[in-house]
Amino acid sequence: QRGLPGISKKEIAIEVSEGPILSFVIVTFNSEADIGACLDSVQSTNQNGRFQVIVIDNASEDKTVEIVNQKKNDNTVFFQNENNEGFTKAVNQGVENAGGEYIFILNPDTQVTEESVLRLINKLSSDNLIGLVAPQLRFPSGGIQYSCRRFPTFWNVITEMTGLSRVFSQSNLFNGWKMKDFNHATGRDVDQPAGAAILVRKDLLLKLGGLDERFPMFFSDVDLCRRIKDLGKRVVFCPDAVVTHRGGSTTLGRRPGLIASSHFSLIKYFMKHHRRIVDFIPNLMIIFLLLVTLPFRIIGNLLFPRNRVERQTL
């Protein structure tokens, strides 16, 4: 093993192979406002061709393709899908074509630094029991995003749909799902960090069959973390690695449709991971509650749209 340029051997020591160490997988859809800065930041980490960049565009109708073509270099692989295949399927497309040992799934509205990327690689490679690592996310203003959550439970959905989680936003009982009790300033094992920036070994992803395409956009990251932990692996939050994340920039304009997608994906999540006989009645209650509240949430969003989305689920 030998250290990588710019980082001390004591802090970062990973094996350097002839091929790429890491493959960034970035899915774009009408991402012209963000993808240029994202690629600039990614390319700034790419000394000596150690990192590969894979961009998959889902039939953007703006200048995203033009910008990617301007920014790409010899380390960039660019796929242009004729149709919008959905986020999850596009990620799997990128993973299948990735040459790196590590896969960094990254949203186009993010910006990374070399130091943070190497710290994540070092953390993931330090313990075979670690299956996935995630950085601390910060808004462009510098504020920390509360990006980690616990796995959803029946109680979480009830408190979220009835508004109790917002009325008692700092309560572990009513809003424990969104981990407002965690300051996101210290490292720890978590259930599921935001899928905006996550690093995982390619061989583990392939073993799991990639992301589950039954979740076109939402909850595929939650499902992935759940399956990783079901294998006895750890999911680790690393605050010493920082990634800037604007948050919601690619989805705000399509919010009503995304609310529906989120509801249906959560239903699928419960049907997949809560399959015991004792879960039958609670599952029916969750389905009923999510379907009944869906039109009210859509109408409420149209009347009072959110200016920022911190986590793209419910």
Image: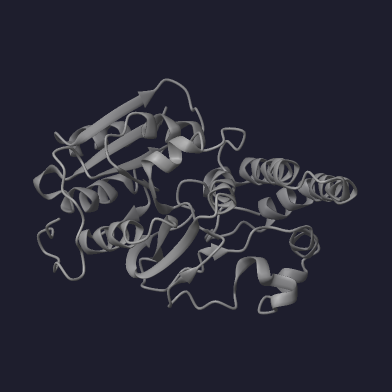
Residue furthest out toward the top: 82
105 left or right of 38?
right
Horizontal side, residue 262 vs residue 129: left or right: right
Give x and y (percent) for residue 282. Answer: 86, 51
Q: Residue at image x 78%, y 57%?
A: 154
- Residue 134 visible to an observer of this rendering: yes
Residue 47 lies left or right of residue 274; in this view the side is left
Q: In this view, does 173 lie above or below 230?
A: below
Please count the marks in the image. Answer: 0
In the image, residue 284 sits, relative to residue 55, either above or below, namely: below
Give residue 216's position: percent from left, percent from top: 57, 36
Q: Can residue 61 be seen in this view?
A: no
Residue in view at x 57 percent, y 47 percent: 227
Reply above or below: 183 against 208.
Answer: below
Where on the picture, by quarter, is residue 203? top left
Q: Nearer the viewer, residue 183 or 63?
A: 183
The C terminus lies in which quarter of the figure?
Answer: bottom right
**Where is residue 129 shown, x and y percent of the image?**
44, 57
* Closer-to-camera residue (301/178): 178
What residue appears at the point 78 percent right and 46 percent down from the top-left corner? 295
Colour pattern of the rendering: one colour
The image quadrant of residue 32 is top left
Q: Looking at the picture, how far across and down is residue 285, in whole percent?
A: 87, 50
Q: In which quarter of the image is the N terminus?
A: bottom left
What residue appears at the point 34 percent right and 49 percent down from the top-left corner?
A: 34
Q: Image check: 21 left or right of 125?
A: left
